[in-house]
Image (cartoon, helix red, strand yellow):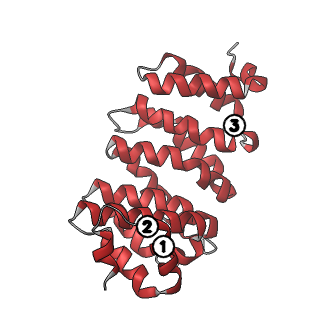
Amino acid sequence: MSVLSDLGRKEVSVENVAKKALKDEEVLSELLQGILSKKDTTRYNSFKVLLLLSEEHPEVLYSRWDFFAGLIDSDNSYRKLIAVRIMANLTRTDTKDKFNKIFDKYYNLFNDSVIVAGHLAANSGRIAKAKLELQTKITYKLLNIDKTDQKHKDLVKAGAIEAFDEYFEEARNKKKIIEFVKDQLNSKSPKTRKIAKEFLKKWENYASLGERK
């Protein structure tokens, strides 16, 4: 029986399907078909399995990098979201620097829907930790969300603060990051204001860095 038929059911064991995919290339191929399905349940379950694999066994999906990279060019925001989240996880095993080559295209998704842009911002922290050579460029992109065409910048900045929190200790631009976060204390988004307060409380030893003279 096809794995896709199982993925079409609301009750499915994501862990069990993931284990099958680790052992069987055909199952993995079916999962890739699944995220392109027009059926919501099949698409969602396939994504959950692939996301789990990307988190726990990124090396298994790395050979399918081009498939996920291709989703960035899709007209479908859900497919772009899949690309954003899974590729962020795959950067840990990106030995061929494939992410570096699509960096600009990836971050151009800040101009997409607020859901895609929000996840892009929030997942940037793990990319910054995996790709140290790109960390400064990533920081720049996050600090300059206001320069994008995103209509919901205030909300997307919540994801940016979450990302900064992941690599702040090793970040080179601590002063600019602190200034950025302090500015969000006056954000129109309650979520962003809350996350900004939590960030500044956590990193209070660095809070004075953002004080303008």
**Residue reaching furthest to the right:** 205
Q: Residue at x 53, y 75 (%)?
A: 62
Instruction: Where is residue 68? Give x, y as percent.
Output: 41, 69
Question: Of residues 57 and 207, which is closer to you in this image?
Answer: 57
Examine the rendered structure and indicate whether residue 80 appears above or below residue 60.
above
Q: CA distance from mark 1 to mark 2?
A: 5 Å
Q: Quadrant of the N terminus?
A: bottom left
Q: Is residue 100 visible?
A: no
Which residue is denoted by mark 2 in the rendering? 13
Q: As shown in the figure, which amino acid type bears the numbered disc 3?
A: Asn
Q: As shown in the figure, which amino acid type bears the numbered disc 2?
A: Ser
Examine the rendered structure and indicate whether residue 63 appears above or below residue 72.
below
Instruction: Where is residue 11? Give x, y as percent.
Output: 35, 62
Label of residue 173 in the image:
3
Check whether the beta carbons of the residues at disc 1 and disc 2 lie within 8 A of each other.
yes
Q: Crowding near pointer 3: few (<14 within 10 Å), some, many (20+)? A: few
Which residue is denoted by mark 1 in the rendering? 16
Instruction: Where is residue 206? Give x, y as percent.
Output: 76, 26
Q: Residue at x 43, y 75 (%)?
A: 66
Left or right side of 1 for 17? right
Q: On the image, which quarter does residue 82 sit in?
A: bottom left
Left or right side of 43 for 120? right
Closer to viewer: mark 2 or mark 3: 2
Q: Residue at x 69, y 56 (%)?
A: 132
Q: Crowding near pointer 1: few (<14 within 10 Å), some, many (20+)? A: few
Question: Of residues 82 and 7, which is closer to you in this image?
Answer: 7
